[in-house]
Image: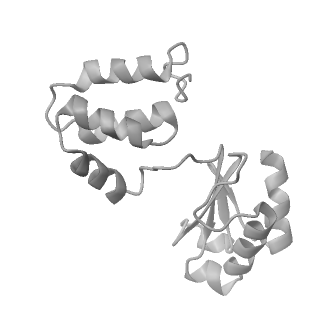
């Protein structure tokens, strides 16, 4: 398997992980940077990688797992190439955000918080995207889409296929 982060494109994931441990092995407070970079390498944090981090940093697995599950930035399951975040904050809710979410969920065939089988999309909800004037809205990767209808939202996904 090759590295997913692009920075180590010529390295296998194992080689990139070895290089990571060379940098951080004896540094105090290295856990979060190691988890972040390991996730960049793999796209998520597989259990085997968490076990290796525990071994290399000489920390209990329970501590590694606790940190990885505490912070929302870390993911223990593979994620899609396209991350869809549908806003369900107050302004979006009042203007039909839940209908937009339902339409996308139905279109993709996955519940919220899940990834499609082909790893093309991960569907998430958020409390606010900070674009209340565009309600209801969603983000796909770094693109914000506003003033959505259920049909328009599902149709927008075609440009990410």
Residue 36 shows in this picture: no
Rendered position, 98 above or below 19? below
Above or below: residue 98 compared with residue 64 = below
Q: Give above or below for 130 relative to 6.
A: below
Q: Name, please, the residue furthest toward the bottom.
A: 94
Which residue is pictured at 75% across the width and 67% down the height? 104
Front-lying residue, 74 or 146: 74
Total numbered labels: 0
Residue 36, quarter of the rendered image: top left
Q: Is residue 94 left or right of residue 100?
A: left
Relative image position of residue 71 (x, y in whole percent) = 35, 56
Residue 21 placement: quadrant: top left
Q: Quadrant of the N terminus?
A: top right
Residue at the spot 23% in from the left edge and 32% down from the top edge:
55
* x and y, in percent, of residue 69 in the image: 35, 56
Residue 15 in the image: above or below residue 90: above
- Quadrant placement of the C terminus: top right
**Would you say residue 145 is visible in this rendering?**
yes
Q: Residue at x 50, y 15 (%)?
A: 11
Q: Where is residue 58 shown, x and y percent of the image?
A: 17, 34
Side of 50 relative to 56 (left or right): right
Q: Residue 38's spot in the image, x, y percent?
A: 40, 34
Task: Choose between 137 and 110: the one closer to the eye.
Answer: 110
Which colour assignment does the render follow?
one colour
Q: Residue furthest top?
A: 10
Query: At 70% from the left edge and 50% from the top edge, which residue is drawn?
Result: 117
């Amino acid at each position: 398997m090759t590295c997913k982060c692009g920075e180590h494109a010529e390295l296998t994931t194992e080689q990139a992980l070895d290089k990571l441990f060379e940098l951080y092995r004896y540094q105090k407070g290295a856990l979060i940077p190691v988890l972040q970079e390991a996730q960049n390498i793999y796209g998520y944090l597989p259990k085997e990688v968490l076990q290796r981090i525990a071994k290399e940093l000489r920390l209990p697995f329970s501590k590694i797992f606790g940190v990885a599950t505490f912070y929302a930035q870390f993911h223990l399951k593979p994620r899609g190439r396209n991350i869809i975040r549908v806003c369900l904050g107050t302004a979006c809710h009042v203007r039909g955000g839940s209908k937009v979410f339902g339409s996308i969920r139905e279109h993709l065939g996955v519940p919220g918080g899940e990834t499609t089988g082909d790893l093309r999309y991960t569907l998430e909800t958020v409390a606010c995207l900070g674009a209340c004037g565009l309600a209801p809205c969603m983000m796909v990767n770094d693109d914000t889409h506003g003033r959505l209808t259920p049909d328009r939202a599902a149709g927008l996904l075609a440009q990410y296929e």
